[in-house]
Amino acid sequence: MELTEARLKFIEAWGKLGSEWGINRTMAQVHALLLISPESLTTEDIMQELNISRGNANMTLRDLIGWGLVDKQHRPGERKEYFFADKNSWNIARQVAQERKKRELDPIIKLLNELSDVEGSEKEPNYRVFKSTVRDINKLAKNVNKTLEAMLKAEESWFWGSIFKMFK
Amino acid sequence: MELTEARLKFIEAWGKLGSEWGINRTMAQVHALLLISPESLTTEDIMQELNISRGNANMTLRDLIGWGLVDKQHRPGERKEYFFADKNSWNIARQVAQERKKRELDPIIKLLNELSDVEGSEKEPNYRVFKSTVRDINKLAKNVNKTLEAMLKAEESWFWGSIFKMFK
DNA sequence: GATTACTTTCAGTAATGTTTGAAAATACAA
DNA sequence: TTGTATTTTCAAACATTACTGAAAGTAATC
């Protein structure tokens, strides 16, 4: 396969993967483009490569910066901003894990804790099933939480080394 | 908090969580309803509880069955179908992991392997960066894959026990 | 303080995804 | 085989989300 074709396929696949996981397709594509670009790119570059509008490029880049996946540089004598992505996949995974934990897991754990205190009678089947389901999901959520915390602190080699030992 | 309110909040939160992870909101809500229902429910029940149309209920239930999260029962003498969900959160997590692996991770690993064979010259920075990015993501994907496989085979207690040892 | 080079905003529009509801299909019982 | 209960399908309507482009904002330079 040729490089040009491969790059397009990579961008397309990354976009699709993102959209399957609740991340807007364009945002994932911009990220993909930055991942395979040796030099940092301007808004203009990105607009051209991906055929998107200025507004879209700008908003998407801001979002990516918000996710901690992209940073910008300034070059002396130029006002233009240059964007680049951390290309280390372990860092990317950690960054995404950290953001999703903060935005989604933490709030749901909070809610599950509140729902654990529901009032009612043990005689009511609805009550019993609700309590035990919530308790069970809460336990899972807390285990996921702990695992993510370990992952966030971990060095890549240490983390996968430990995982490896699990099933050697 | 009262049970009625708590049930509504749970359904709402599960729906929101689903939509943040690329699962249609209604599908997650139907799942939530079944998770907190002591008895299996008919299409009619679900339509009423969630105020959704027959068509929507039917399609959503079929999808949930496709994800392995819901099953149906028949009762002697009745044509009507009764739906219920496995309430064990470890099974749910495994089921979701299994399906997403099959639908998303496996195809992307296949693609990454193909992209690894891209042709080009080591002198071209585009080529070098592309290769090393793809290689790096591929490595991560394979590690995730192995971890999921371990999870799919594992008993809950064994899995979390092993995770726990990682950071004690 | 005017000009240029850029970035940001956002109302309007386009694209995509979801839901409805009624008709068609199916299964069952008499 | 006919009637009835139920499920399934799918075109059209609706809702949500994403994108555009032009205008407004900002910073740097002369």
Image: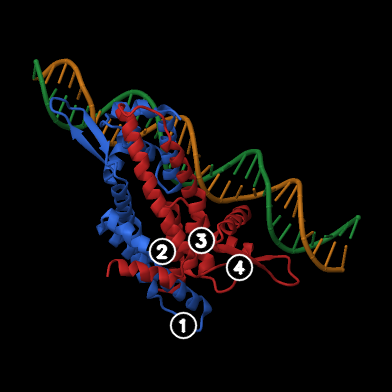
Chain colours: A blue, B red, C orange, D green
Residue assigned mark 4: B41
Closer to the chain start, of discs 3 and 4, is 4
Tell me the CA gap for discs 3 and 2.
20 Å
Q: Is residue A125 left or right of residue A113?
A: right
The kind of residue tagged 1 is Ser
Q: Which amino acid does label 3 sit on?
A: Gln
Q: Are marks 1 and 3 in contact (CB under 8 Å)?
A: no
Q: Mark 2 lies on which chain?
A: A
Q: What element carries label 3?
A: helix
Q: Distance between the residues labelled 1 and 3?
A: 32 Å
Subunit bearing disc 1: A
Q: Closer to us: mark 1 or mark 4? A: 4
Residue underneath mark 3: B95
Of badges 1 and 3, nearer the viewer stands 3
Kindly identify which numbered label has been placed on residue A121.
1
Q: Horizontal and vertical percent for residue B152? A: 48, 62
Reading the image, the residue beneath label 2 is A167
Residue that appears at 63% across and 62% down:
B43
Q: Which residue is drawn at 46% across and 59% down?
A: B149
Between residues A78 and B134, which one lies in front from this camera angle?
B134
Instruction: Check disc 3: other Cα within 10 Å, few if <14, some if 14-19, many if 20+.
Output: some
Q: Which of B142 and B80 is in front in this view?
A: B142
Circles 1 and 3 on the same chain: no
Label 2 or label 1, whichever lies nearer to me, is 2
Task: Name the residue nearer the viewer: A138 or C11.
Answer: A138
